[in-house]
Amino acid sequence: MTKTQTKVNVKTVERVILPPPVHMVGDGFRVHGFFPSSVLSARRMSPFYLLDYNSKFVFPPSRNLLGVGPHPHRGFETVTIAYHGKIAHHDSRGNAGVIGEGDVQWMTAGSGILHKEYHEEEFNRKGGLFQMVQLWVNLPAKDKMTEPRYQALTNSEMGRVELPDGDGSVEIIAGDFRGVKCPAKTFSPINLFNLRLKKGKTVEIDLPENFTTAMVNIEGSSLINGTEKVPEDNFVLFNNDGRRFILEALDDLTSLVLSGEPLDEPVSAYGPFVMNTPDEIRQAIEDFQNGKFGELEG
C-alpha cells in the first residue's frame, strides 16, 4: 500500500471469477460469457449488461465465412474490442467496416438496427489467432430510442497515458485516466481502459467509489492490492468501497478495466433487446417483425 493509498479509500476485490465454459455465438465467436449470470446479475453489473470474452483461439482456414448472420438490437450499445484477428461488420443502414487488431467499434443500437459480424475475409481465408471482447452497455431509459450510430476508434485515436520509467501504458477507450480523455461519446459516465504493464511493475488506478468496477486479464496474471492473485483470462469484480487499487503485473500484462455509474432503473431483456419494461420488449419484437429495423442480407 502506497503513501497515497489508505484503508479508507482502497477499492477491494469482491470476487475473482474463472472463465465460464465456452459457448459459440454463431460459428465465429468462441466465448466465455462472464455476465449476466447467476453470479453476476444485470443489476449488479449496471450500466454494463453483458460481457462475452473470446479468449485466445486459433481458427483454422475456412472457405465459409465464420461469424454471426443478421440479427436485431435495440436499447443498448455494443463495444467490440479486437486484440487478435479482424472482424468485419455490416448493418441495415448501409454502414460497414473492419475492426483491426487494437481497434474498437462502439455501436449504439438505440431505437433499432439489424447487424451482422464476421471474420474479416482475408483472416477467414488464412485462419489465425483470434481474441476479442464484446461488451454491452445499457442505455438510460431516456436514451433507449436514440438514433443508431457508430463510433469507430482506431488504436491511434484513443487517449494514451505512458506510465513513468517505461513501466507500461494505458489506452483510454472511454472516459479519462489521469486527465487524458478519449473522444468516444457515452450516454452515461463510463471509463474503459486497456492497461498494459510490464512484468514486475505496478500502477495505481483511481476510479469513482460508487461506480461498478471490474477487470479482465486479457494477457498475463496480476496481483491486486498485494493480496489477490488474478490469473490470465479471469474476471475481477471490485466492491464499491473505495477509489484506488494497486495493480502489479506478475507477467507482461494486458487488462481491460471497465467502470461505470450504475443506472438506477429496471431492466427487462429478451435476447438482443434490452429495455426497461416487458411492454417495451413486446414492442421491440413487434417492430422487428414488421420490418421497422430495416433490411440486411445474410
Image (cartoon, rainbow, N blue to C red):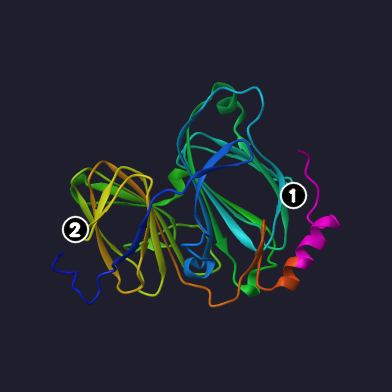
Q: Quadrant of the C terminus?
A: top right
Percent coordinates x, y for residue 152 in the rendering? 56, 48
User: Which secondary structure lies at badge 1?
Assistant: loop
Lateral position of residue 185 relative to residue 212, left or right: right
Mark 2–mark 1 distance (CA, rounded to whole Å): 49 Å
Q: Nearer the viewer, residue 281 or 151?
A: 281
In this rendered view, identify the residue nearer to me: 176 or 233: 233
Secondary structure, mark 2, is loop
The residue drawn where x is 64% and y is 70% is: 143
Question: Which residue appears at 65% of the width and 72% of the height?
Answer: 276
Image quarter where the N terminus lies is bottom left
Q: Magenta span covers which residues?
A: 282-298
Residue 229 falls inside the magenta stretch: no
Residue 40 seen in the figure: yes
Of the pair 73 and 108, the residue shown nearer to us: 73
Q: Which residue is mark 1?
A: 93
**Residue sitting nearer the eye, 270 or 218:** 270
How many other residues sit within 10 Å of disc 2, few (<14), some (14-19) or many (≥20)?
A: few
Which of the two discs, 2 and 1, sits closer to the camera?
A: 2
Q: Is residue 180 left or right of residue 185?
A: left
Q: Which residue is mark 2?
A: 226
> Can residue 153 be seen at all in this image of the molecule?
no
Check if residue 286 falls in the magenta segment. yes
Toward the left, the furthest residue is 3
Amino acid at pointer 2? Gly
The residue furthest right is: 290
